[in-house]
Image (spheres, grey):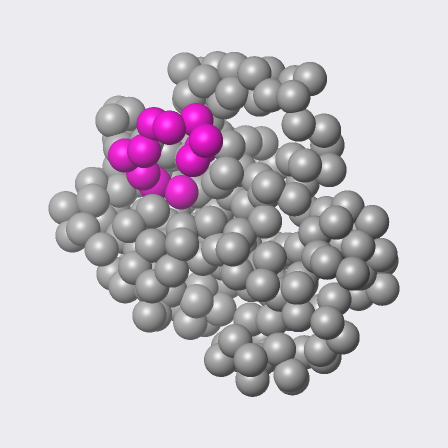
Amino acid sequence: MEDIAVVIADNQPISLSGIRSAVADENDIRILAECQSSEHLLDTVRQFCPDVVLVSAEILREERQEMEALEQLVTEVDETRVIVVTSERDPVFLEGALRSGASGVFQREWPVNEIPMAIRKVTNGGVWLEQGAAERVLEQALSRRGTPDSDELRISSLTPREREVVDLVCEGLRNKEITDRLHISLATISHHLTSIYRKLEVSDRTSLVVYAFKRRMVKF
């Protein structure tokens, strides 16, 4: 069986050192590269094509909202599993990370020797979330039952930038026109649309417009 290839990304050198030490004696895990800034994160992942990326929430929020950055990363690295490393305990954040495509969340308070187990679990198709955190996420989800309907939950999962993209698509703008309006790249627009289609469970631009008008996401 081939080694599990890993990239670690954290802007705290002591955290990088801790992760490196945690897997140093594991014969089946190999660190390909380390990254200390969001600026180089995507390029590093594209270059090494790892099986797993461990990325800190701090790096994700360096340039934008964490979930938006996470969604772009997940979309860019379709075959790579992403584990978010964080000090955050809020179940809303934890659920948001999983909804945004993370395969696991590793909280900094957990024993560092559990990192290899997390890496192996997500590599095998599982989801890594410590039991207490999983219980908090479940309680959060159950507390919403009978309150907002499924459409409201889908719509609420959109990031502010994704809502802007939906509005502009419904205005009839094409991707190039949206890039000019929002000052972002065509690739980023594509990532946003992929995420929007997944969250709203629509298949294309036309069904997105129909969904948005039907649910009154935009005005007639």
Q: Residue sitting at 36 percent across and 54 percent down?
A: 60
Percent position of residue 158, x then y: 59, 49
Q: Is residue 188 left or right of residue 154?
A: left
Q: Residue sitting at 27 percent across and 63 percent down?
A: 37
Image quarter of residue 41: bottom left
Return the residue nearer the eye: 62 or 1: 62
Return the residue nearer the eye: 48 or 206: 206
Q: Quadrant of the C terminus?
A: bottom right
- Determine if residue 18 is in view: yes
Q: Is residue 41 left or right of residue 162?
A: left
- Determine if residue 5 is in view: no
Residue 78 magenta-highlighted: no
Q: Is residue 187 left or right of residue 88?
A: right
Q: Residue sitting at 22 percent across and 49 percent down?
A: 16
| Residue 80 in the image: above or below residue 48 | above
What's the magenta region? 84-94
Percent position of residue 40, x then y: 34, 70
Return the residue nearer the eye: 169 or 74: 169
Return the residue nearer the eye: 211 or 116: 211
Q: Is residue 177 left or right of residue 9?
A: right
| Residue 117 in the image: above or below residue 57 | above
Q: Residue sitting at 66 percent across and 70 percent down?
A: 168
Residue at the extreme front: 220
